[in-house]
Amino acid sequence: MKVIVIGGGAAGMMAAISASRHGADVTLLEANPRLGKKLSATGNGRCNYTNLDMTLEKYRGKDPEFISEVLSGFTVPETLGFFQSLGIEPRYRESYVYPYSDQASSMVYALMDELMHQSVRVETGQKVRSVKTSGHGFTILAGEKTFICDRLILAAGSCAVPSSGSDGSGYTLSEQLGHTLIPAVPALVALKCKESFYPQLAGVRVRGEVILRINGEAAARDTGELQLVKYGISGIPVFQVSRYASYGLRDRKKVTAELSFFPDKTLEEVLSLFLSRRESLSYKETGQFFLGLLNQKLAEVLLKQSGLALHKRIGELREGELRKLAGLCTGFPTVVTGTNGFDNAQCAAGGVSTREVNPRTLESRKVPGLYFAGELLDVDGICGGYNLQWAWSSGYLAGKAAAGNRAGKDRVRKDQYDTHKSAKASRR
Ligand SMILES: Cc1cc2nc3c(=O)[nH]c(=O)nc-3n(C[C@H](O)[C@H](O)[C@H](O)COP(=O)(O)OP(=O)(O)OC[C@H]3O[C@@H](n4cnc5c(N)ncnc54)[C@H](O)[C@@H]3O)c2cc1C
């Protein structure tokens, strides 16, 4: 079986290895001069390649059942075993898993070694321009070259960080082959906010909670280290809620956020803390109220927003004034006007509709012999190794199925899949 994989990122390299291990004659086409450019930048250069806390809530996409089926087809223990077989020992930080070397480059080199070991032909510098079905296979045009194959795996990534090579051309190729796209938006990205005080807050890092609201309704929340930047809000908790902001803004809805700088306390608990500080710090000026409690730059903005007179003695502050200040500290409102864009997004939400793809084999339901893997599909995970696990699971299954291995068992026809789905639904 001649298999071509388009895209030499995490999903494409996994798919090529898997197809070759299952007996296919494999060629991998990559636009960049080298493989795994994005992979080598992951996890701040350390590569958080999976996570032991693997639940469906960590993923977003229109079809959770699809996601669940793919992840259970090639699991986290199987992923750990696969990489150990390539020499990558895991280093655990709580549930987060990194290579013991703490170098993303070791992941890239281990995968490249295995591609060579499996005799996969790797053609770099081959940007695929068009793909057509021909007879029982595919004809692929890349640069001046034409390639033909029996089965094709599209693993060309999304449009997040186009400079890494994943410039959205995978979407175009999927459309050429008749697939439907869910519009892509930046996910895992910083948010731009309207208020003019952000330049003053730039550089502040504070543990907090962010609640993202779309037209006033809470859409997502997360807690962790918030980073305040000159144009708005950033940090892991903001990344985790950002895809909802992207879709809200795209649909021209009102997107706001509320920040709590005391994520472990209720408003009443914060008020009670403030009342006791009024006693103990009564002789100081209001401008000193947050000294030793919150970052000074943040304190200045909070006090200004509260409208309190800074030279007033703390002991003279009324309970109503302290309640207002506590309200600001636990529900600091901000208006989200935009996101930081694809150039700085760690992944894209949206992509090829999973309704048109078989979750057991990753084969297209529209074009027999065509398979998908990785971020190109309409699946995005939160930060923490979930996007790479998606690349490994989908890549492995696509490669295995494209090689034609265990065809009768794995290549489930659409009607069989639908029966399986309705049987599952009736069991619930
Ligand atoms: C800065 C950063 C840090 C991240 N850190 C983590 C992390 O620690 N953990 C985690 O789980 N996720 C992380 N992610 C997300 C993760 O890297 C991606 O989800 C994952 O790499 C997607 O893999 P992929 O193979 O689908 O796509 P990609 O890795 O983008 O690979 C697609 C490949 O296809 C090639 N290609 C595209 N179009 C064509 C074409 N027309 N012809 C030929 N080749 C083509 C591209 O050049 C590219 O090499 C991070 C992302 C970024 C940007």
Image (cartoon, rainbow, N blue to C red):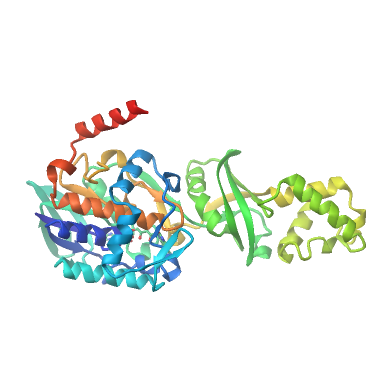
Q: Specify whether residue 54 is in view.
A: yes
Residue at 20%, 58% (x, y): give it: 18
Query: Quick one: quadrant of the N terminus?
Result: bottom left
Residue at (45%, 68%) from the top-left corner? Answer: 44
The location of residue 277, given as percent across then percent down, is: 84, 57
Q: Residue at left 52%, top 41%? A: 252
Above or below, 406 against 50 in this view is: above
Q: Position of residue 272 (x, y in %)?
A: 81, 49
311 sits to left or right of 32: right
Q: Nearer the viewer, residue 413 or 420?
A: 420
As drawn, 313 above or below 112: above
Q: Is residue 159 visible?
A: no
Location of residue 32 (image quadrant):
bottom left
The quarter of the rendered structure image containing the C terminus is top left
- Quadrant hosting ligand 1: bottom left
Q: Nearer the viewer, residue 200 or 81?
A: 81
For the image shown, how many numbered marks are present on the structure? 0
Q: Is residue 424 left or right of residue 230?
A: left
Residue 110: image location, x then y, percent: 28, 70
Q: Is residue 283 left or right of residue 231?
A: right
Q: How far across and down, in percent of the image, does residue 286 sit? A: 86, 60
Could you tell me which residue is drawn at 33 percent across and 25 percent down? 426
Taking 152 as reference, is 127 above or below it?
Answer: below
Quadrant hosting residue 166: bottom left
